Image: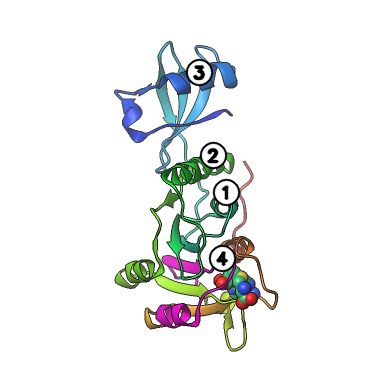
Amino acid sequence: MQRLAIAPTQIQDGQILLTEAQFHYLGRVLRLQTGDRFMALDGRGGAWMATLGQKTAELGEVICFDTELSVRVTLMVAMPKGSGFEEIVRQGTELGVTGFQPVASDRTLLKPSANKLQRWRRIAAEAAEQCERAIIPTICDPVSFTQALQTVAETQVQGYIATARFEGVSPLLTVLSPESQAIALATGPEGGWTAAEIQAAIASGFVPVSLGKRILRAVTAPIAAMGAIAAYFERDLSRKVK
Ligand code: SAH
């Protein structure tokens, strides 16, 4: 089924007010004709069947997706250089991330432009669509690591910080709890966290965690962590076959 991401404000009186670009996309790219049906997703959990009209689309029945993890996960990622964050957004979204908090750490090299942020948000929307999530993960504006720690400390979110050197650090799987409602996981940049950053995180209530004996790249670590988190929280899942 062809899918279209819409903004919640585009829905009015049972109609979707399509933009020129969306109209073009439906007609020229997806090759839909008047009367054809497609799926509209508002990125906040709303999903509907819709029928293409002349300049608008008629809103049809609600679609229920059940593709979210039982836990809300914020990935706090010290931005890797180059386009590494794009990979993290795409694959993290597929694995069920609720939100991304890009952070500037002591050894972060990247200073993202407003364009980059736009691009990351577009990638999150595309990935959510592709993997049938009705919720598009949020991508917050980048903040300093200190600021990010403070935000987590102020909420009821359990924080974890991935540290590449594993002596005395618990494996992630052994410290997760099935009752968790919301967690935040911090991963460092290419050069790793500084000792001061790890101390500050621990002081804010973060638990240091290991992702295994090998040193992972800054792009691999958040994805590996997210894979483990998704597997942990969905270990009893048995997919209903339609
Ligand atoms: N250059 C650093 C490693 C940086 S790896 C060093 O040699 O120590 C980039 C980030 O990925 C780390 O800051 C950490 O958050 C995460 N990471 C990589 N491997 C990991 C592992 N085995 N366990 C937990 N975190 C890991």
Q: Which label lies toward us, 1 or 4?
A: 1
Q: Are marks 3 and 2 in contact (CB under 8 Å)?
A: no
Q: Are marks 1 and 4 in contact (CB under 8 Å)?
A: no
The CA span between labels 3 and 2 is: 17 Å
Circle 1 is placed at which residue position? 90
The CA span between labels 1 and 4 is: 16 Å
The quarter of the displayed image where residue 168 is located: bottom right
Is residue 211 visible to the viewer in this orientation of the structure?
Answer: no
Which one is nearer the viewer's eye here, 6 or 115? Answer: 115
Query: How many C-alpha atoms fall within 10 Å of the one at disc 4: few (<14), some, or many (≥20)?
Result: many
Residue at image point 61% right, 48% down = 240
Which one is nearer the viewer's eye here, 101 or 133? Answer: 101
Residue at image point 42% right, 32% down = 6
Q: Secondary structure at mark 1?
A: helix
Mark 1 or mark 3: whose residue is earlier in sequence: 3
Query: How many C-alpha atoms fall within 10 Å of the one at disc 3: few (<14), some, or many (≥20)?
Result: some
Residue bounds of the magenta highlight = 177-202
Residue at image point 64% right, 62% down = 220
Mark 2 or mark 4: whose residue is earlier in sequence: 2
Mark 1 or mark 4: whose residue is earlier in sequence: 1
Rendered location of residue 179, percent (x, y): 45, 70
Q: Is residue 92 left or right of residue 198?
A: right
In the image, farthest residue toward the right: 214
The CA span between labels 2 and 4 is: 22 Å
* Disc number placed over residue 229 in the picture, else none: 4
The amino acid beneath tag 1 is Arg
In the image, farthest residue toward the bottom: 168
Q: Secondary structure at mark 2?
A: helix
Circle 3 is placed at which residue position? 24
Circle 2 is placed at which residue position? 126
